[in-house]
């Protein structure tokens, strides 16, 4: 792992600062929106707008890179992010924030695609899995560190909005001054949704539901925290608990995934996540239970993302795995756009704890659909040893990172085929 870091340290340092900036803006807008008197519905539209921009960027940025190159796209989108971040406290209107979130979602996705392309190019067959793991640690670590920064300033002022703008601007210096030119940029054409659903209905349904859970966590957790009266420090701890648990549980769940039936694990992890949501929903008002619920939902939903990709791969030929990733991410993106909008309506209709009911119902739906699928297609003919290897990947990843994970899957499958029988 250390060797991987030293080989691409500038890229990882730059990505850490970018993730701090992204983690800051999500929490800041939720807290500042409460101060400015924005309604829950307005904030849900603002938060959903980020994922709309992210989804569009995942489709159009690869073409933009092919036309003008990685460096120009990286620099241009970075400038856009910095400008939008410092405009939030100036344009204190929900429509302006929503527009800014579309632009910043587009720009962040484009920046991630560019950086992940460099990471993929710098990785070899021997260290690709370690590179992916370190990249995920950097992503989660940046978001968690951002929550600490939130507690160090005045939410009603300007400074906390200027800090992420500065960090994003500084993030580009080490990357642009150290990375080598990229070769010709290529992405795999996504598999048709119809073919993907036919190959693995559970992976498709799970990805859509999981998009809603993740976007609710990323976009609406700070809104929920401010609505129930948590202090800025408590909101920071709550959001941090989601991502710390996601990082800590990614590896033990991945270890289990390679050793037991993967569909059974998906069902159990989903049901545990649903139970975690119900803890805070049934017993509202306890900060400790909010932290516990946040950790359980975050620690189960994020590993589920990689689990569902691996599960889909179990039913795909090696040559189809890379194209499947694009289709799965598109489905996940649709769920992510709908997530904040739906949870905002639920919080308005049934109260603030609609946040937990929403995540709980979605996690329950994944587990329930997994149980239904177990009655429709048996996995008895699929030995645990025949399952593709698990590769950690964050729910905030772009098609490039997921294709990088798919390369890990493919290489592991090829190694298994070449290994002598014992």
Image (tube, rainbow, N blue to C red):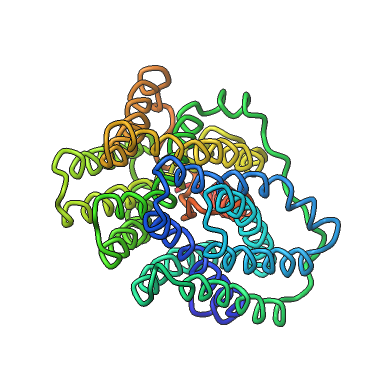
Q: Is residue 28 visible?
A: yes
Question: For residue 35, which quarter of the picture?
Answer: bottom left
Q: Nearer the viewer, residue 261 or 237?
A: 237
Q: Is residue 69 above or below residue 38?
A: below
Task: Say whether residue 17 is left or right of residue 238.
Answer: right
Image: 15 above or below 112 = below
Res. 411 visible in picture:
no
User: Residue 79 or 375: which is nearer the viewer?
Assistant: 79
Q: Position of residue 176 (x, y in %)?
A: 71, 77
Residue 287's spot in the image, x, y percent? Answer: 18, 56
Residue 361 rendering spot, x and y as whole percentages: 32, 32
Could you say which is closer to the camera, residue 212 or residue 9? Answer: 212
* Horizontal and vertical percent position of residue 83: 64, 67
Residue closest to the eye, 327 or 39: 39
Would residue 86 be found to the left or right of residue 185 on screen? Answer: left
- Left or right of 385? Residue 171 is right
**Residue depicted at x 43% and y 65%:** 143
- Identity of the residue drawn at 85% across and 61% down: 68
- Kindly indicate the quadrant of the structure image that contains residue 59: top right
Residue shown at 45%/29% (left/top)? 202
Determine whether 279 is above or below 2 in the image: above
């Amino acid at each position: 792992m250390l060797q991987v870091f030293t080989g691409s340290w500038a890229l990882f340092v730059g990505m850490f600062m970018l993730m701090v900036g992204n983690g800051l803006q999500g929490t800041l807008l939720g807290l500042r929106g409460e101060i400015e008197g924005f309604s829950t519905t307005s904030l849900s539209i603002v938060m959903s707008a980020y994922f709309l921009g992210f989804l569009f960027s995942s489709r159009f940025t690869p073409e933009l890179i092919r036309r003008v190159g990685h460096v120009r796209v990286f620099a241009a989108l970075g400038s856009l992010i910095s400008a939008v971040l410092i405009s939030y406290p100036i344009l204190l209107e929900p429509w302006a924030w929503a527009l800014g979130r579309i632009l910043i979602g587009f720009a962040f996705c484009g920046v991630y695609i560019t950086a992940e392309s460099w990471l993929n190019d710098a990785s070899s067959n021997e260290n690709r899995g370690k590179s992916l793991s370190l990249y995920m640690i950097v992503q989660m670590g940046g978001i968690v560190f951002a929550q600490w920064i939130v507690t160090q300033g005045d939410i009603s002022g300007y400074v906390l909005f200027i800090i992420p703008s500065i960090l994003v601007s500084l993030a580009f210096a080490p990357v642009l001054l150290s990375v080598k030119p990229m070769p010709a940029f290529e992405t795999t054409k996504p598999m048709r949704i119809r073919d993907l659903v036919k190959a693995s209905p559970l992976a498709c349904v799970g990805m859509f539901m999981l998009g809603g859970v993740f976007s609710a966590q990323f976009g609406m957790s700070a809104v929920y925290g401010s609505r129930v009266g948590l202090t800025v420090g408590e909101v920071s701890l709550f959001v941090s608990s989601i991502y710390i648990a996601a990082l800590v549980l990614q590896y033990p769940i991945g270890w289990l995934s390679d050793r037991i039936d993967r569909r059974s694990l998906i069902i159990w992890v989903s049901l545990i996540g649903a139970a975690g949501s119900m803890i805070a929903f049934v017993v509202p008002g306890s900060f400790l239970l909010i932290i516990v619920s946040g950790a359980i939902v975050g620690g189960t939903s994020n590993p589920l993302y990689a689990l569902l990709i691996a599960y889909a791969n179990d039913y795909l030929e090696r040559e189809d795995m890379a194209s499947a990733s694009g289709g799965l991410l598109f489905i996940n993106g649709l769920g992510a756009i709908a997530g904040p909008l739906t949870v905002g309506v639920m919080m308005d209709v049934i109260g603030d704890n609609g946040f937990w009911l929403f995540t709980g119902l979605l996690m329950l739906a994944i587990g329930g659909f997994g149980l239904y699928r177990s009655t429709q297609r048996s996995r008895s003919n699929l030995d645990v040893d025949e399952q593709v290897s698990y590769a950690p990947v964050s729910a905030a990843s772009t098609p490039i990172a997921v294709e990088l994970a798919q390369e890990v899957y493919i290489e592991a499958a090829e190694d298994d085929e070449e290994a002598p029988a014992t």
